[in-house]
Image (cartoon, rainbow, N blue to C red):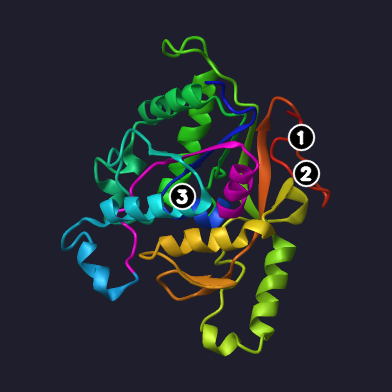
Amino acid sequence: MNKPSRRILFVHAHPDDESLGNGATMAKYVAEGVQVSLVTCTLGEGGPIIPPELKHLGSRREDTLGRHRAGELAAAMRQIGVTDHRFLGGAGCYRDSGKMGSSQNEQPNCFWQANVDVAAGYLAEIIREIRPHVVVTYDENGGYGHPDHIQTHRVTMHAITLASSAGFGNSVPHQVAKVYRNCLPRSLVESSLRQLKESSGAARHGRIATIEYIPGVIDDDLVTSAIDGSQYAMQKAAAMRAHATQIVVDWPYFTLSDGVVQPVYATEYYQLLQSVVGGGTTGGIWEDDLFTGL
């Protein structure tokens, strides 16, 4: 069977990262007939648990949160329409590393301790199988300094190089044309937070995020791409709700386990990190399709 003419791969650290950062983009491209694939690097075993009735899943009791979150991810992908989603190295190959400096960082099977060559080899084979034109991941700081996000960037960029090399493996090499990171333009975040603080219902939302709290905020002139996902906003919200251990959605806002209120963005923003075909513009004139130039 012939592959779809446009193919995109999202690489994320934990279940829920994809819905928070790319839910509307993924739903839009699925609706347009693009082959959308997702690789998640851990099961998210170290994440907090919001619903009290699910606290027993935590590592200090049953330690089954990872398996539960895999189910949440599958439910989220059904909402968006993504049928190709997989875990790097297989489910449970790499454990959630927890926050930077935590004892979880030292566990030998956590993703932070993974051999980058080995992990990138797993991903390179997936890239050669899928043959995506576009890959989306994080920047070198992982958006906000989480060790699994940083490692995801390292592994993804190395995998892209391996996948294109004739000296790697026995499968047919593939050159990814464009690589993006998730981001948010500073002016948008400043405006949306100001509106949230001034809204008549702000009191019921509790503590509102500061701009420093929100991951991936960059100056507007560094943003290269904006994908209007407003038509798919409810799919994004539904996918976020599927991650019930991690996220509470009160549209158009959401909170994580700490209860800090953030806006949900239906338009999703990207910065072009690498390209062999050009594309991506700055200075406020942004491309509206990640496949621009292909």
* Residue of label 2: 287
Q: Where is residue 157 in the image (x, y as percent from the top left)?
A: 53, 32
Q: Is residue 56 left or right of residue 151?
A: left
Residue 176 appears in the figure: yes
Lower position in the chain sequence, tag 3 or tag 2: 3
Residue type at tag 2: Glu
At 52% from the left edge and 57% from the top edge, which residue is drawn? Answer: 20
Q: In this view, does 5 lie above or below 57?
A: above
Q: Position of residue 88 (x, y in %)?
A: 37, 36
Q: How far apart are marks 3 and 1 (CA)?
A: 28 Å
* Residue of label 3: 77
* Residue of label 1: 279
- Start and end of the magenta stretch? 23-49
Nearer to us in this view, 79 or 45: 79
Q: Is residue 107 above or below residue 1?
A: below
Residue 145 appears in the figure: no
Nearer the camera: disc 3 or disc 1: 3
